[in-house]
Every structure is written in C-alpha cells, then in structure tokens.
Image: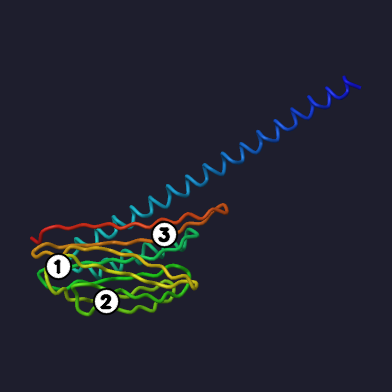
Amino acid sequence: MFLIATVFIIISFFVIRNVLDIYNVFEEKRSQEIRTEDLQTKNLVREYEQAAGAASMQSNANRSAQDYLFNFSSFLRNTRDARMLYLFAYSNSTTAKYSVVLGNFLNDNVNATISATNSDPVTAQFVLADRRNATAEFIFLGNGTVELNLTYTVRNEVRKDLLNITVQSPRLFMTLFTDITLEGNNIIVRHKDIYNRTWYAP
C-alpha cells in the first residue's frame, strides 16, 4: 500500500508540475502580448507627434493639422481596433490668436468643453460625432501661460485633462494632446500624452 501511495504521489507531482509549467507559458505569452500592445500604442503617439510637427511647419498650420491628424486617425480606425481623441493648439503669436482643433475617433459621440485662461472667449463647446473634427479660435489677452481645460463626455464617462501653453511674442507654439486606446487579443491599452513645441517666428 505504501508503495502504491508513493507512486500516486510521484505521478501527482509530475502532473501538477506540468500544469504549472503550462500556466507559466500562458502567463508569459500574455505578458508579451501586453508589452507589444503597449509599445504599439507609444509608437502611435510618436506618429501623431510627427504629424503635428510637420503640420506646424506649413503655411496654414491649422488647416494642415486638421488634414494630417484626421487622415492618420482614419487610417488607424480602418486598420486597427483603435479609438483616439486628439487636441491640437497652434498660434503664430504675432496674430494674437490661437486655434484649437479637436478630433473625435472614439467610436461614439463626444460632448466637449474647452475652458481657456487669459483668452477670449473663455470657453468653446464641441459636439462631435465619430470621425469628425472641429476648430475653435481664441484671442490671447497677453503674454504668459494659458491653461486649456478639456472636459469631454463619452459613453457616460466624464474625462478631464489640463494643458498649459506658453504665449510669448514673437514665438510660435503648438501643443498636441492625444488619448489613444488599442484593443487586441482581449487586451486594452490606453495611453495619454501631451507634446509641446515652441520656436521663434522667422
């Protein structure tokens, strides 16, 4: 009896060890998939930054940003299970104005409010269907820091973000905010980022 019990114990040990090894393999595979999705999301953030930077160098930066960011977002939605919201703010400070482009690719309608300090008007409202963007224009009232408070509602969830931009003539500025979510292999990765660039007017 003792010998039979010993055999069963040994067999049970090897069975349990094999089950645990299989579990570890699945866990490692899952971890690799999560890291891959995270890296892909960060790569997309950098692609948005490059698109915004290229747009800011065009003669009509606001129009170029609308086109570049919209086309890139449409491409992502057509090829990946991705949801994005972006905000692009740009100013040639010699005009005393700055524009804000808001793009919705969240696969749902978005109600958004942008509140701006040191600006006129102080707020702008956006009601955007999916795959749409819109532009609001502000006048800054003096050199200094402008706080852009973005509040938007999607799927009954209220999200809030704060962007600080520095207005100082004769410099130009651009600010890009991205909120990107990727889904794949039952994995959801969300990444938010703010990219700023300031340079002197020629």
Q: CA distance from mark 1 to mark 2?
A: 15 Å
Where disc 3 sits, the SS reads: strand
Disc 2 marks which amino acid? Ala
Q: Quadrant of the N terminus?
A: top right
32 with respect to 167 (left or right): right
Provide the residue designation for mark 2.
136
**Image marks 1 and 2: residues in contact by CB distance under 8 Å:** no
For this orientation, the residue located farthest to the right is 1
Looking at the image, tell me whether mark 1 or mark 2 is earlier in sequence order: 1
Where disc 2 sits, the SS reads: strand
Residue 49 found in image quarter: bottom left
The residue under the point 47% across, 72% down is 108
Looking at the image, tell me whether mark 1 or mark 3 is earlier in sequence order: 1
95 with respect to 149 (left or right): left
**Image marks 1 and 3: residues in contact by CB distance under 8 Å:** no
Disc 1 marks which amino acid? Asn
Residue in front for this viewpoint, 102 or 13: 13
Provide the residue designation for mark 3.
180
Q: CA distance from mark 1 to mark 3?
A: 28 Å
